[in-house]
Structures are given as C-alpha cells and as structure tokens.
Amino acid sequence: EEVAPIGGKKGSDSDSENEAIPDWWSNACMQDAQQTDESISVIYTALQNNTGRPELEDVYKWPPMARTLWYYWSRLIRKGILCYRWEDLDGTGARWAQVIPEKYRHGEFLKRHVDWYGKHRTSEEVIELMEREVYWPRWQIDVQVWTRACTECPRGRREYRKPPKPPDLKPRR
C-alpha cells in the first residue's frame, strides 16, 4: 500500500525554488527526492539502514535539518518514505505528514497560499492546510516569513498593515 501522495500541480522537473510536488508522484519519486536532498538524506539513509538511532557524536556532523529530525527518531518513516508522525494531544490518534525535500518547500507553501480563485490566504490558514500533509523542522516559521514577504497579497489585510504612526503631540504652554 502506497502512502497517499500530497497534492500539487503537474509541471516540469525544473530546479525552481517554487516547484511543488506533482500529484502524479509515486512513493518511489518521493524516496528519490528525499535520498538526494542534502538537508535530509543523512537521516533518511540512517533510518533505512535499520541500525538503530545514531549516537549524538555522529549526529553533530549532519546538516542542521537532519540533526533536528534526529530528535524525533521514533516518530519518523513510514513505508519507506520519510514521514513525521503527528500524535493527537489526547493520545487517541495520529497522522503522518511527509517530510518535504528542501527544493520543494516553497512550492508547497505557494500551492496552499493562493487558492483556485487567486485569493491569498493568511499564514494561519496556510498552516492549518499544511499541517495535515507536510512537515519539515521550523515549517511554521517559514510559512509566516513567506506570507509576510508575498508581494501579491492585498495590503489591506490586518497582518500586512503597518501600525499607524502615533500623532505628534506637543505639550501646551
């Protein structure tokens, strides 16, 4: 049984930083992308080798993203794909989110930031959509930064408005 693919737009396999993962990707495609990604390939390989959790001294040589994932060792991997296990607070259930290779992260954000009608969602709305399907360390911070940096978002939205300047009050004599 394959892990359900995450959504995306069909497109070319360019190295664009805005590239999203296509709908038609199989588990094998995701495995290849995770194995070749510089930030997560080390942890992927360590999990696939099934030799147990590496010692902390070895982990210090890894890229920062892989070191962060190492802390969640028991919550990673599902059916050959690097996934993160989200557990419900009450302990009644869990769901799996795919760990996204670095070159696809911004594209996955954009796919959820702009809806079919061209409406730009707030960072809270994007986070709510993304937490069901994708994961990478510090992803919520990335979403907030990318949302604030969006040049096409309406300026009238509360999170984009600059606070008004206080009035220039001079004391009376």
Image (cartoon, grey):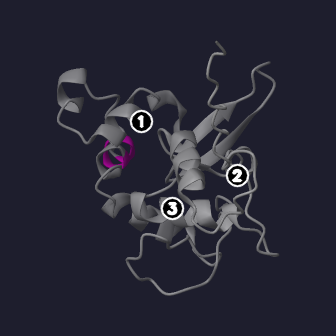
Outermost residue toward the top? 173
On whether residue 153 falls in the magenta region, the answer is no
N-term mark: 1 or 2: 1
Q: Position of residue 160 (x, y in %)?
A: 66, 50
N-term mark: 3 or 1: 1
Q: Position of residue 34 (x, y in %)?
A: 41, 59
Instruction: Tally the marks.
Output: 3
Residue in the picture at 53% in, 56% down: 149
Q: Position of residue 19 (x, y in %)?
A: 50, 73
Which residue does the numbered mark 2 point to in the structure image?
126
Which residue does the numbered mark 1 point to in the structure image?
69
Residue type at tag 1: Leu
Residue in the picture at 65% in, 44% down: 96
Residue type at tag 2: Val
Crowding around mark 1 (Cα neighbors within 10 Å: few <14, some 14 to 19, many 20+) is: some
Where does the magenta region start and end?
A: 44-48
Which residue does the numbered mark 3 point to in the structure image?
106
N-term mark: 2 or 3: 3
Q: Position of residue 60 (x, y in %)?
A: 20, 30
